[in-house]
Image (spheres, rainbow, N blue to C red):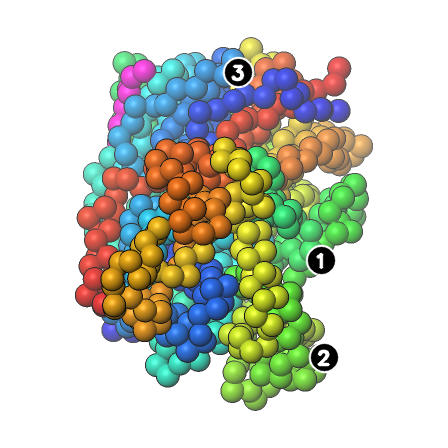
């Protein structure tokens, strides 16, 4: 069966291998965002891990992965959203429609940015592995880590065998999937990753794609012999460096951009982190390091080297390993002062959602406070005692955790919410920054006529996996 | 030498997809490009029309001149369609499965097209090159099925006497344009797919996924020069015409190249007639900030237009007089 699979793979088009890239990367982004929200709402660590573990466990069930990694036509944006809608609700967590829409938009733009930032399509594998590595570290639950490892193995097995031509086809179909999505994300705007028009900022500096040379030279040949060179002015020549490996060791695309800086500093010195200074010596190939947490990137690099017949002592390996960007280890609530933590988290979330402090009484202002639903069992505007609901209790006792990523509120109390909120959906959309660019949300034109019959396959698996 | 003419930017109703060679111009300065599973025709005036084609995976749309008449060819996983220049009627359709069948797991498609004297050729994902004759009355019989290596053809180009095809392995194959279409030359790959081709007499220009542009002399079967031109895959090459009114007669000496690295380059090409005229040089570099260029084409009036992925405008660059 393995031989048949390999033969079939070699004849398969790269364009039919897009779904794992989409699902695994968008799934990773979803977990990052949910993790950040769970921390922001001070959900206890064990509950948060349960939520994330349940979602990951559903996303990486063997049956689902089996179906995902089969060559198939790419799903439409709408069908893909349905997959994640089911995934997000596979645990005790609940998301309202607006929150789910916002979550999906963040996931979409996050992955789009990561993919267009890749220097070559081969790095899509690295982005995927970065996501998987961090998820495995984030939720160290029995069974979950094993499932993620299976996904890592499958991804490496599948993508390291693709020909360069198929990588180009894969790149084309993936970028078509995200074409038209220009939703403005505050985090991107603040970090200058996105322009005010919604276009993502491209960066051509730094490492070049593997086998790409520094621009600026014209070489002449005669009788198959090199005879001379001319140089021409290229601004990028001094801004770029040649890559010796297909995968870039320090490539951070796919890592958690929703981490706070304090978390970043904390985890950098952790010896258990792959490639940390204490575990890597300069000049020593990583392949020689006997570490239990061997980098999936190393494995992929070796696999690429084998399949592409690279040569050289450091072929496929990095000789100057530096620590990867920190992993998002779950934070213990005890490390933060409660009142400072809550304010800081609200600030981060407001930055995330792009909402500034509301001006009191200005209902028309698009600058509104976001709403965090800390009491999901209480109906809005309804007093607990007056409702006579004896079963109403803390969210944790009821087992349901509501994640609210709704930015449409300007009130400070639930009673005020009900009075001030206008539940007219049209107004909600008008006030939302995410709907500012109407064209940017219209990305669902692709592939309408092919793959639709297959769209239900993964969705059916999602239902059966619950 | 060139400058961006921001006043002449063409606004589009649909943004181009990231494909190779995803912009083509006609004699009448019409433009065509592919967006997802659609083909758009755009005029310099800004008028944009969608071609009424059936849904398919489109790999390329290109204007070609057949017997002095400009037509629009659409290449997809279904086969090749030939439309009138304005996209109002389909003149010819060749279903790919009629030739290659339904066998095999892999999906087949056509990509790469070039027009010759009285025929045109298209490339297949199987490595085949199909040659269709051009008869009066819109009849295009399949006259040749050329085989190369078992690697997908990426692009085609031709001169008055030679048809050249490139594939995913970066290899180039040349066929004499005569009754037999026998293969007369080949150039090795360089480890990256050849993504775009154009040709001026015996000078063959090839762009690669590694960002290189290589120039081969087909008269002496040698690599003449290579340029480390771009930092991403070259997505388009275009040669200017000496006389725009008589396109297809004689190509000029300027080569425009574009890439996903946000760059447009214009190069001066040598003619190799004397020792002094054996060097290429960079004439102009244009930065299209935050735009992944996906196609480039010369227009009349010494202008160059560039299409970019996910951008609803085509940039125009004009030559400084």
Is residue A133 visible to the viewer in this orientation of the structure?
no
Verify CB contact (< 8 Å) between mark 2 and mark 3: no
Residue A174, position as x, y percentages in the image: 42, 49
Judge left or right: residue B209 versus residue B225: left
Residue A68, position as x, y percentages in the image: 30, 62
| Magenta-drawn segment | B88-94
> Above or below — where is A259 with respect to B222?
below
Q: How far, Cα to Cα, is label 1 from label 3?
A: 39 Å
Which mark is on residue A37? Answer: none
Question: Mark 1 sits on what residue?
Answer: A241
Q: Chain of mark 2?
A: A
Report crowding for label 3: few under 14, some 14 to 19, many 20 or more residues within 10 A (C-alpha): some
Q: Relative to the observer, which residue lies in front, B305 or A385?
A: A385
Q: Relative to the observer, which residue lies in front, A123 or A217?
A: A123
Question: Mark 2 sits on what residue?
Answer: A282
Question: Mark 3 sits on what residue?
Answer: B44
Q: Chain of mark 1?
A: A
Q: Secondary structure at mark 2?
A: loop
Is residue A339 visible to the viewer in this orientation of the structure?
yes
Q: Secondary structure at mark 3?
A: loop
């Amino acid at each position: 069966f393995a031989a048949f699979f390999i033969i079939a793979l070699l004849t398969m088009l790269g364009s039919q291998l897009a779904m794992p890239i989409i699902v695994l990367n968008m799934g990773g982004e979803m977990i990052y965002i949910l993790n950040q929200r769970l921390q922001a709402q001070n959900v206890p660590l064990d509950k948060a891990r349960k939520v994330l573990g349940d979602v990951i466990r559903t996303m990486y069930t063997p049956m689902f992965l089996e179906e995902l990694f089969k060559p198939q036509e790419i799903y439409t944006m709408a069908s893909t959203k349905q997959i994640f809608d089911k995934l997000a609700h596979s645990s005790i967590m609940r998301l309202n429609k607006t929150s789910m829409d916002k979550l999906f938009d963040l996931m979409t733009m996050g992955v789009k940015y990561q993919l267009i930032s890749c220097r070559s399509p081969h790095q899509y594998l690295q982005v995927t592995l970065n996501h998987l590595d961090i998820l495995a570290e984030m939720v160290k639950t029995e069974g979950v880590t094993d499932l993620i490892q299976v996904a890592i193995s499958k991804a490496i097995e599948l993508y390291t065998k693709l020909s360069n031509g198929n990588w180009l086809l894969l790149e084309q179909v993936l970028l078509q999937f995200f074409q038209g999505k220009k939703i403005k994300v505050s985090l991107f705007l603040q970090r200058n990753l996105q322009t005010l028009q919604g276009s993502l900022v491209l960066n051509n500096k730094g490492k070049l794609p593997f086998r790409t040379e520094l621009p600026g030279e014209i070489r002449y040949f005669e009788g198959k012999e090199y005879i001379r060179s001319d140089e021409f002015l290229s601004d990028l020549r001094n801004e770029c460096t040649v890559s010796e490996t297909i995968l870039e060791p320090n490539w951070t695309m796919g890592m958690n951009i929703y981490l706070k800086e304090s978390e970043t500093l904390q985890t950098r010195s952790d010896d258990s982190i792959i490639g940390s200074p204490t575990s890597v010596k300069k000049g020593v190939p990583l392949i020689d390091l006997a570490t239990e947490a061997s980098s999936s990137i190393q494995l992929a690099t070796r696999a690429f080297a084998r399949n592409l017949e690279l040569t050289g002592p450091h072929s496929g390996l990095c000789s100057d390993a530096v620590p990867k960007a920190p992993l998002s280890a779950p934070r213990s609530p005890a490390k933060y002062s409660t009142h400072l933590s809550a304010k800081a988290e609200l600030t981060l979330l407001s930055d995330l959602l792009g909402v500034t402090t509301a001006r009191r009484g200005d209902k028309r202002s698009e600058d509104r406070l976001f709403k965090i639903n800390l009491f999901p069992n209480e109906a809005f505007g309804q007093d607990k005692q007056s409702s006579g609901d004896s079963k109403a209790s803390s969210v944790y006792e009821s087992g349901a955790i509501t994640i609210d990523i709704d930015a449409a509120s300007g009130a400070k109390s639930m009673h005020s919410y009900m009075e001030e909120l206008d539940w007219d959906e049209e107004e909600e959309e008008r006030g939302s920054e995410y709907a500012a660019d109407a064209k940017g949300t219209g990305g669902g034109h692709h592939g309408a006529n092919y793959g639709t019959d297959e769209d239900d396959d993964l969705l059916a698996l999602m239902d059966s996996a619950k | 030498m060139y400058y961006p003419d921001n006043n002449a930017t063409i606004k589009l109703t649909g943004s181009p997809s990231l494909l190779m060679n995803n912009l083509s111009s006609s004699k009448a300065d019409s433009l065509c490009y592919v967006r997802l599973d659609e083909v758009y025709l755009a005029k310099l005036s800004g008028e944009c029309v969608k071609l009424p084609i059936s849904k398919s995976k489109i790999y390329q749309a290109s204007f070609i001149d057949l017997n002095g008449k400009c037509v629009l060819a659409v290449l997809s996983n279904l086969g090749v369609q030939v439309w009138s220049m304005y996209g109002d009627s389909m003149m010819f359709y060749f279903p790919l499965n009629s030739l290659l069948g339904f066998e095999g797991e892999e999906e087949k498609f056509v990509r790469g097209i070039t027009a010759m004297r009285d025929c045109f050729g298209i490339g297949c994902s199987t490595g085949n090159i199909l040659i269709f004759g051009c008869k009066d009355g819109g009849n295009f019989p399949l006259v040749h099925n050329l085989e190369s290596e078992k690697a997908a053809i990426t692009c085609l180009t031709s001169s008055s006497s030679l048809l050249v095809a490139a594939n995913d392995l970066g290899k180039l194959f040349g066929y004499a344009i005569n009754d037999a279409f026998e293969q007369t030359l080949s150039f090795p790959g360089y480890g990256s797919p050849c993504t775009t081709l154009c040709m001026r007499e015996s000078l063959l220009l090839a762009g690669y996924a590694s960002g290189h542009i290589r120039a081969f002399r087909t008269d002496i079967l040698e690599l003449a020069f290579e340029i480390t031109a771009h930092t991403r895959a070259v997505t388009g090459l275009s040669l200017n015409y000496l006389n725009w009114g008589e396109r297809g007669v004689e190509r000029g000496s300027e080569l425009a190249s574009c890439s996903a690295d946000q760059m447009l380059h214009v190069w001066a090409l040598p003619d190799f007639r004397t020792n002094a005229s054996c060097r290429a040089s960079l004439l102009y570099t244009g930065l299209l900030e935050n735009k992944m260029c996906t196609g480039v084409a010369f227009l009349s009036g010494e202008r160059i237009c560039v299409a970019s992925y996910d951008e609803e405008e085509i940039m125009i660059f004009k030559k400084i007089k």
